Amino acid sequence: MSEAPILQPSTLAIHGNRVREKQSNSILFPIHQTATYVHETVGVTKGYGYSRGGNPTVNALEQAIAALEGTATALCFRSGMGAISTLCLALLKAGDHVILSEVVYGGTIRLFRQVLENFAIEYSFVDTADLDAVRQAIRPNSKLLFVETPANPTMKLADVAALAEIAHAKGLLLAVDNTFLTPLLQDVLKLGADISMLSTTKYIDGHNATIGGSLATHDETLTERLRLVRKTLGTIQAPFDAWLTLQGLKTLPARLELHCRHAAAVAAWLEADSRVHCVNYPGLDSFAQKAIAERQQSGFGGMLSFELDASVEESLRFIDALKLCTCAESLGSVETLVTNPATASHCDLSSEERAKLGVSDRLIRLSVGLEAPQDLIADFEQAFAAVFGADGGAR
Ligand SMILES: *Cc1c(COP(=O)(O)O)cnc(C)c1O
C-alpha cells in the first residue's frame, strides 16, 4: 500500500483529518446541538455519552486543529483561558512552582495571582528571552515553563528550542501560548515544546465570531488527563462555536499569508514616517531579534506595535481619529483592530511595571487585518491630519 501523501497547510486546513457526516453526506459537518446521546442498549453508546465530555462537532474541530498541530488529536475549550486553566489544574498540585513569561496574556497573570495563589501554587514571572534568567528561576519544585512568544505588545521573542532544552534538562514541561502565530507560522511542538496552546478566538476563528481555546500535545497520557479534567471542570467548547470556528479555520492559511503581507507593508510605511518614533515588528531589519524570528517562524505575523513621536494625549487622540482601524480588544480577525495597551490589556500593571516591559503609555498595538494596506495607510494619514493639522509634519 502506498503512503498517504504529505499535504500542504492550505490543503490540510480544508481536508486534514476531516470527519465525514454519513447520514446525509452534507459537505459541512453538522452542528450536533445536543446535551446527551441515546444508549443503543443499556451502557452501549456510539462513543458519546454527554456533551460535557465530548461532542461530535467539537471533535470535528479538534481533528482539524490536530491536523495543523501534527498531533493525533487536540482538545477544544470554551475559551483560551478555559484551556490554560484546565492545563494548570491538570498538571499542578499544591507546592508546585511554575515559571511564566513576564509578558503573558493578562488573563494568565490573573489566573496565577488571583486564583492559583489560593491553592499554594508558586510562580515566577521571568524574561523568557533571557535564557540565563530562566535557568536561574528553576527550583527543585518547578514543574512547568509557560511561554508566550511573540510577547504582547512589544513583540519580544523567546527562543522555543533553547527553552525546551533548558526545561527538559530539569524535568519541566514546556507549554507555549502560540495564539499570535498559530502552528502554521510557528510549529512549537516541532521546536521541542510539550504543549501547544491556542486562543482560537483569534486567528483560528479569524472573524470575531467566537471565544475558544485549544491544547495539543504528542503525549497521549497527558491528553487523556486533560480530557478528564476538562470533563470535570466543564470547560469544553460548545457545538455551535466549534462549528463556526471550523469554518474559519479552513481559510487560516490564506488569511495568514495576507495578514503577514499587510502587516509588513504597514510596518514599513510607519517606520519610514518621521512622525513615528519606533515600530516593533519582527520582519523589520531594525527589529533586534529578527534572526530568532527567521529561525523559528515561517512568517512574521500580523501583529505590530508602534509609538508616535507625540505625547500620550496626542497618541490617544490619534487612535480616536482612526476611522477604518477599529479600537477594540482582541486580535487576529479580518478587521484591523487597534488598542492602547496601557489603558487596555496592560491596565492592571503600574506605570513602572509597564515601563520595565517596554510598554510605554503611548504605545499603540495594531492587529493588521485583511483590508487593502493602502486603505489602512490612508486612514493613518487622515488621523495624522486630524490630530496634527494638514501640515503636521508630512512625510
Ligand atoms: C486572547 C488570548 C488568550 C485568552 O484567550 P480567550 O479565548 O480570550 O480566553 C490567551 N493568550 C493570548 C496570547 C491571547 O491573545
Image (cartoon, rainbow, N blue to C red):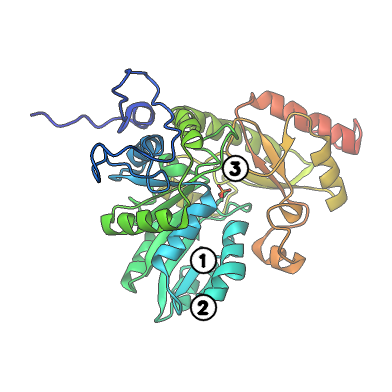
Give coordinates of residue 315: x percent, y percent.
Answer: 82, 46
Is 197 drawn above or below residue 90 in the view shown? above
Residue under the point 82% across and 33% down? 383
Residue nearest the viewer, comparing 329 with 255 = 329
Give coordinates of residue 38: x percent, y percent.
Answer: 33, 37
User: Which one is closest to the eye, mark 1 or mark 2?
Assistant: 2
User: Which one is closest to the eye, mark 3 or mark 1?
Assistant: 1
**Residue 317 numbered tag:** none
Q: Are marks 1 and 2 in contact (CB under 8 Å)?
A: no
N-term mark: 3 or 1: 1
Would you name the residue on which mark 3 appears?
A: 303
Question: Dot 2: what SS?
Answer: loop
N-term mark: 1 or 2: 1
**Does residue 222 appear left or right of residue 341 in this picture?**
left
Residue 365 visible in the displayed image: yes
Question: Dot 1: what SS?
Answer: strand
Give coordinates of residue 171: x percent, y percent.
Answer: 33, 72
Would you name the residue on which mark 2 appears?
A: 120
Hey, what amino acid is under mark 1? Leu
**Residue 100 numbered tag:** 1
N-term mark: 2 or 3: 2
Hey, what amino acid is under mark 2? Ala
Q: Quadrant of residue 374?
A: top right
Hey, what amino acid is under mark 3? Met
Q: Which quadrant: the C terminus?
A: top right
